[in-house]
Amino acid sequence: MAGATAIPRSGDAVRPMTAGEKKVIMASSLGTVFEWYDFYLYGSLAAIIGAQFFSAYPEATRNIFALLAFAAGFLVRPFGALVFGRLGDMVGRKYTFLVTILIMGISTFAVGLLPSYTTLAAYNVGWIAPVTLLALRMLQGLALGGEYGGAAVYVAEHAPAGRRGFYTAFIQTTATLGLLLSLIIILSTQGYVNSAYPATTVTNPDGTTTTLTAFQVWGWRIPFLVSVVLLAISVWIRLQMQESPAFKKMKEEGTHSKAPLSEAFGQWKNAKWALLALLGLTAGQAVVWYTGQFYALFFLQSILKVDQFTANIMIAWSLILATGGFLFFGSLSDRIGRKPIILGGCLIAALTYFPLFNMLTAQANPALHAAQANVPVVVKTNKDDCSFQFNPVGTAKFTKECDVAKALLARSAVNYTTENQPAGTPTVVSIKGKDFPVADPNFAKAVPAALTEAGYPSASANPTVIKASNPIDIFTGQKLAVVGILTILVLYVTMVYGPIAAALVELFPTRIRYTSMSLPYHIGNGWFGGLLPATAFAMVAQTGDIYFGLWYPIVIALFTFVIGLIFIPETKDRDILS
């Protein structure tokens, strides 16, 4: 391991990667891939998990609780950054992110073993299931908050001075690879279990019956249980690693921080860089990342009405095709700098999102695209009665007539305008000049029927919408066009995300590096990025324009571009041992 722990010097830039350095990267990246895999499993299976652990409630309520548990993982990430960042700067990089992966892996495995609400309710302790699930989700979020900073710092402090961007770019591939791995495991498990085992009919509390596939009943646990194998491999590799050379040098010299939190955030000379890192780097990076991977998937499914399997296949192919961009842009940042690539990615994304998503609509659902352009729909209401339907965890209720009308149209991917009416006027939806009062008990059925008659495609009968029959069914003009557009969006992700770890590591001194870089990263990605789908949907519902939600990432990306351009220094040639 001598090659892995030698202190990097600037002259090392021209030499090839040593076997020890390859092991450092593999240990850090592999573990982080597994952590992201664990984290994404819950998001992908939230609806099934809600039925398992919140079955005492009606379907709408159980979905709300499932989303709340998912959101908890995002909300606690910055706190994990503080807890484990402090440990990393005081105790060491290696042992801290060894702890994070153990917490993450054990929590995920435990979800696969956790008895359902119905099982525990037989012993009058059904409440233990949802409470334990929420606790495990919070542990996952805390662990993820500490994992990324540890992996990025560990790799950067082993890397030759002239190749930090390239080396840390391997860490940047892990979120995408973790998402891809989770999709592959879920789809393959679902396909096998449902074909090999029969469906089950269950009786609901209201006396009705529901047919559940084997995957919905028990097969969903397999991806969670499989994670223990991934955990064992990662822990075994990490146990063999040595401490970062920069941290060892600092400990030997007695210059490590004894109070990383107060030094990083209690002193303005350091705290200002954490604030600038958030506003001038990670906020824009986060919204570009979430738009290219998560909002694109949400847009395909919820707005364009592409089925879940096809949408996941299209996203998976775009991830496969574009993932190399992380390494390309990370390496390029070693030559031309971190700042021009990250800020350039924010700017290009902001300038092209509208045409790209418009093209995505035209290719993925041509009938919907035509209807949006040719079928006039107007909501006639008093605008003061309309709410901004921001509902990140599904707990808010919007019952006003204006809100009911707009929510229905937004869920149906209808472009509409709003015509203001005097106070007290009943809200109506006008489709090609024909009015449908919201107060009509048949409103929820009448409007979709009228939309279909006017030219909007039916969700159950739309031959123009893109549909894949298997994972390699992409070789038609329509599907290749969709994959191409999605690949461009993911390339933007690689542009802003590939160099970000090196940029953050280089902004802060060794003694408080783990703490300082982790917090702005996880606030940016956990909050600015994590709230993107809910915010964008609320903006769509508010305006009646399916593309209006894109203003959220566009404005933040442009804001980051301006702040970063003015205040963020170029850091690629900095000595990070000081």
Image: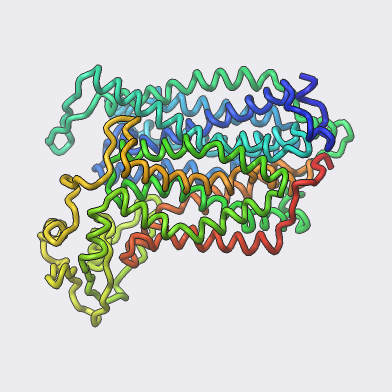
Q: As drawn, is 23 to the left or to the right of 436?
A: right
Percent across and percent down for residue 39 are: 48, 35
Which scheme is used to colour this image of the protein?
rainbow
Q: Can residue 354 be seen in this view?
A: yes
Residue 379 higher or lower than 12, as above or below: below
Q: Which residue is drawn at 63% across and 19% down?
A: 237
> Is 522 or 414 nearer to us in this picture?
414
Q: Residue at x 34, y 36 (%)?
A: 474
Q: Tell me where residue 42 sits by quadrant.
A: top left
How many labels, in total? 0
Q: As drawn, is 353 to the left or to the right of 122?
A: right
Residue furthest to the right:
253
Residue 64 higher or lower than 271, as above or below: above
Percent across and percent down for residue 203 are: 16, 31
Q: Residue at x 43, y 21 (%)?
A: 225
Q: Can residue 82 be seen in this view?
A: no
Q: Tell me where residue 469 sits by quadrant.
A: top left
Q: As drawn, is 265 to the left or to the right of 527?
A: right
> Is 62 or 537 nearer to us in this picture?
537
> Is 366 or 543 nearer to us in this picture?
366
Image quadrant containing the N terminus: top right
Percent across and percent down for residue 436 are: 13, 67
Percent across and percent down for residue 168 are: 66, 37
Residue furthest to the front:
477
Image quadrant containing the C terminus: top right
Residue furthest to the bottom:
422
